Amino acid sequence: MMQIIGTWIAAGLTLAIFSFLYKDNPFYKFAEHLYVGVSAAYAILYVLYFDVKPLLVDKFISEQGGERWILLVPAAFGLMMLARWIPKVSWLSRWSIALTVGIAAGLGITGQIQGILLPQIRGTLVPLTTVNNVLMVVGVISTLIYFYFSAAHKGALRYGARLGMVFIMMAFGASFGYTVMARISLLIGRLHFLVYEWLRLVK
Amino acid sequence: MKIFEKIANIDSRIIYLLLLLVVLIPLVFKLVLPINLSDPVKQAYQAIEQLPEGSVVMFSVDYDASSAPEIQPMLLATLRHAFSKKHKVVLLGQWALGLPFGEIGLNEVAPQFNARYGVDYVNLGYRPGYRAQMVGLGREIRDFYATDYKGTPLDQIPLMQGIHNYNDIDLLVGLEAGQAGEEWIQFAGARYGLNIIIGATGVIAPDMFHYMQARQIRGLIGGLQGAAEYETMINHLGTGVAGMVAQSWAHLLLLGFIIAGNVGYFVVRRRKQS
Amino acid sequence: MKKEIPLAITFITGLIIIVTFFIPHQPLGTMQQRLLIWYSIVLGFTMLLGMDSLLRSNLQRIARRSPGWPFALVLIIGFLGTLAAGIYTWATSESLLSLGSSFMYVYTYFIIPLQATMFSLLAFFIASAAYRAFRARTLEATLLLITAAVVMLGRVPIGAEISQWLPDSASWIMEVPQMAAKRGIFIGVALGTIAMSLRVILGLERTYLT
């Protein structure tokens, strides 16, 4: 019974949001506000259940000695992040931001070099024995030239940049095609729900 | 010649209605078309297929409801494939709003293969931290996940007893709707040599081909079409295949709109100029 | 001191992470692992940052009976209801994700349809935008349009029904020119990220402190 009620609620909310396509209206506004409220509570519970409890509280209980007390450091950094709520001490949140930014930047440098730069350059160094390989190498180099702004795009650079533009446009076109696929899939998903689970028009 | 002006000025609501119809009709009449298999999806399939029985496959649920229609069929298909090969499944998630999809998927597929929780599969849950977590798991999973999502210590879970870091994971199936896929490639793949296949939304998939070519990932399932291909390969048709006629018709309609928009625009413009 | 300490924190943490990449042995390895866990913990707290203003502004809207205040009430009720469902599930169920729990009920019948439908609207908007904005005015735009058309047809089953040339061409576009351009872009982005990260660690880039 609860499942049937739930399905009707879900269908009602789905239609309320679809109603926006006709024009903005109270049903849509209702669903929109409900979404924000529900998601916010969900995020709070998630932080408590999957972050604060296992990584701070449970560890504080299970750890011994110094390891236990050192957990107060990340707890303090976490709370300092929330200092943004209180204007007088909001500057404290910079400490927490600095911690996350420092770690993210450190990881960013190593990750980008090891994970993208080197393997991607290695992937470009292919024998130029096939048309596709030649095209690929030309495509990578000309795209890089297009984004090279330290010198004016004159002479050879101009032709390189122009060629790069051709490759970039093809990439954007391909991305657009895939994005269309993605967006239509989302609509299919909702209509699938309405047809198969709510109306049960099809078994 | 008024027809061209009409073509150039179709009301948005007519466009919406036509799109709704071309998606709805194939779904109601359950129309299907044969699915063409592509190399990146075949390679993703092979990555799971060729693992020896009992290998450990980690699934990362990095999406939420906003892209679930595309990726949930991938999760179900790859889970089915993994369980059918008697692989062990370790699931976790990088998206707070998405982890329940992992749980829903496991509960749907595992019973069909008599897979038992804790022995054949485990759900570790979610932790914030993306890249930091990915690097940290390479050293010790327990540092981030001392327990599974229910709070059971990992050492009390039979499946997890010998699993400590990426050395004990044979393959990662990253199901991606955002940045996390790239981070898995950088911080688990490049840094620790973890084998990865990616299932990605249509928006993300084009950004994965250069990783395929550089062999940084071993397979790519892109968009609903990718999901439909995987379903076809494991011979278990699901919502991926079911949606592809609607998808086809919608693409045709959109191309029709683009052509109509261009024809209307250029004819009206030429007339104004003359 | 309000700026110096954060700059020092960024410098030290960034440096530890980089050095540990090359020397992962003790004590650096343990130190890095500790920092990574801290990062995870602190990042969780950032998810709470918007709550304060969200709740305060909506409660104010209700208190002042501002226009549209009933919707603010819906937001608050949704928030409190979900919170109650979550706390109840936490207290009585095996886990927050237990299927059949009140929290998962809210997830399944509220969050999924709301979020999924919100994003599915994009299907309609992309159709309308394609009709209105996708014009073959220049050579580049025409190229973009043709590529999009081939990929759109080639990546769905109807493409192969029309001609096998379509899926083959779509695959070629994805694997050769598209891939080459994306690689160029990603290499450029990587160089930019590395430069920016260095500036951040060295304290030259300070916008994150404002």
Image: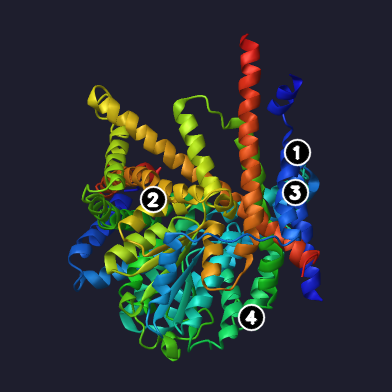
Q: Residue at x 62, y 57 (%)?
A: B244
Q: CA distance from mark 3 to mark 1?
A: 12 Å
- Please rate how many residues cluster around mark 3, counting C-alpha atoms within 10 Å: few if below 14, some from 14 to 19, many from 20: some
Q: Which mark is residue C175?
A: 2
Residue beneath label 3, please? B21
Where is B169 relative to A26, above or below?
Answer: below
Q: Residues at marks 2 and 4, common chain?
A: yes
Counting from the top left corner in percent of width and height, residue B130 is at 41, 62
Q: Residue furthest top?
A: B274
Residue C194 as seen in the image, left or right of residue B249: left
Q: Chain of mark 4?
A: C
- Residue occupying the point 37% across, 57% down: A100
Compute the Cα span from label 3 to label 4. Answer: 46 Å
Provide the residue designation for mark 4. C91
Camera-side mark, 3 or 1 = 3
Q: Residues within 10 Å of mark 2 (few under 14, many from 20)?
A: many
Q: CA distance from mark 1 to mark 4?
A: 48 Å
Q: Amino acid at mark 4?
A: Ala
Same chain check for tags 1 and 4: no
